[in-house]
Image: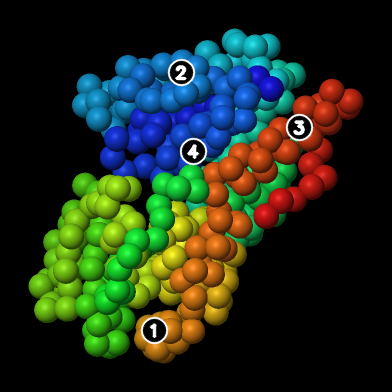
Amino acid sequence: MRIAQISPLTEAVPPKLYGGTERVISWLTEELVALGHEVTLFASGDSSTSAKLEAMWPKALRLDGSVRDPYSLHMMMIERVRRRTEEFDIMHFHLDYYPFSVMMRQSVPFVTTLHGRLDLPEHQPVFETFSSVPVVSISNAQRRPIPKANWAATIHHGLPKNLLRPQPAKPSYLAFLGRISPEKRVDRAIRIAERAGLPLKVAAKIDRADADYYKDEIEPLMNMPHVDFIGEITDAQKPDFLSGALALLVPIDWPEPFGLVMIEALACGTPVIAYNRGSVPEIIEDGLTGFVVEDETSAVGAINHLPQISREAVRKRFEERFTSMRMAQDYLSLYRDMISSQSSSGVYRPHLVRA
């Protein structure tokens, strides 16, 4: 199959720094190539891939201080992809709604995976206007605000089976992993650990946009005696960090569309204690791979039940549900459905939902 993967130019594929979407695109692309498909990746020139790379800009925009209008470059990329549509059997976009207007006016099947939140009021008229454009959700929860969109599938993210594995360790602390921002609520994690009488290790980055929030509200909490602020860590450091944790705390305060940190923990056999928001109940199996909680009190209570969780079972469920190979196979099944439907009727009408 001739497949085009079209990535944002914000980060390289895979990203040099933080970038969840571009990491997922990289994992998907590499699996598709490994399965023998002819994949072309449209991305920044500093990307690294086994696919054929079509560099749309020399450097990821977040690292290129000369670019002041990133939207212009994405518009350029969409038009360049449109001019080459006949080279592909399917085109897979990761650019939110930006390609809808142009791509719906050509005949080659295309689909867009929506990676972000969809609960803002201005999203409603966009998806009502483009109600025939097929889109993929990364969780069923992500769909709720726009039920009338042309949902082709729900396909959960996956990561390479051997990227993160359990390490020999005696779990002794609670962990927070990811990004420090108002919606991630590291302050809740700090209070939960304090109430449980356990140390908390925080491995997280601070975006420039969240610098004031960190300085004003979070930095004083980092001086508490039970808190160890490590900073941002790499994939190579995550197995030891997560394997040493009794649980990963995910006390989010927003409708998280997916949450890669949760499956990173599962890959290491580490249970997750997460607030019942967004995709959490789809990712975490309560009592098997962790606990889904409502507030700080129930989170503290869940810590007492962690000995009931088998870390071997947690890893097994990761292998069954959240590998990048499973993700790639789900997308291939969708691609084939779309190509077959387009060939027979000239339009794609989704008839199957995957989750």
Q: Which mark is residue 27?
A: 4
Residue at image coords 26%, 57%: 204
Residue, far right: 344
Q: Amino acid at mark 3?
A: Arg
Q: Which residue is mark 3?
A: 336
Q: Residues within 10 Å of mark 3 (few under 14, many from 20)?
A: some
Measured Cα–Cα span from mark 1 to mark 4: 33 Å
Measured Cα–Cα span from mark 2 to mark 4: 15 Å
Measured Cα–Cα span from mark 4 to mark 3: 20 Å
Looking at marks 4 and 3 on the same chain, the residue that comes earlier in the sequence is marked by: 4
Which of the 4 image quadrants contains residue 71?
top left
* Image spot of residue 168 (x, y percent): 33, 65
* Image spot of residue 113 (x, y percent): 58, 40
Q: Residues within 10 Å of mark 1 (few under 14, many from 20)?
A: many
Q: Quadrant of the N terminus?
A: top right
Looking at marks 1 and 2 on the same chain, the residue that comes earlier in the sequence is marked by: 2
* Image spot of residue 201 (x, y percent): 23, 68
**CB contact under 8 Å: marks 2 and 3:** no
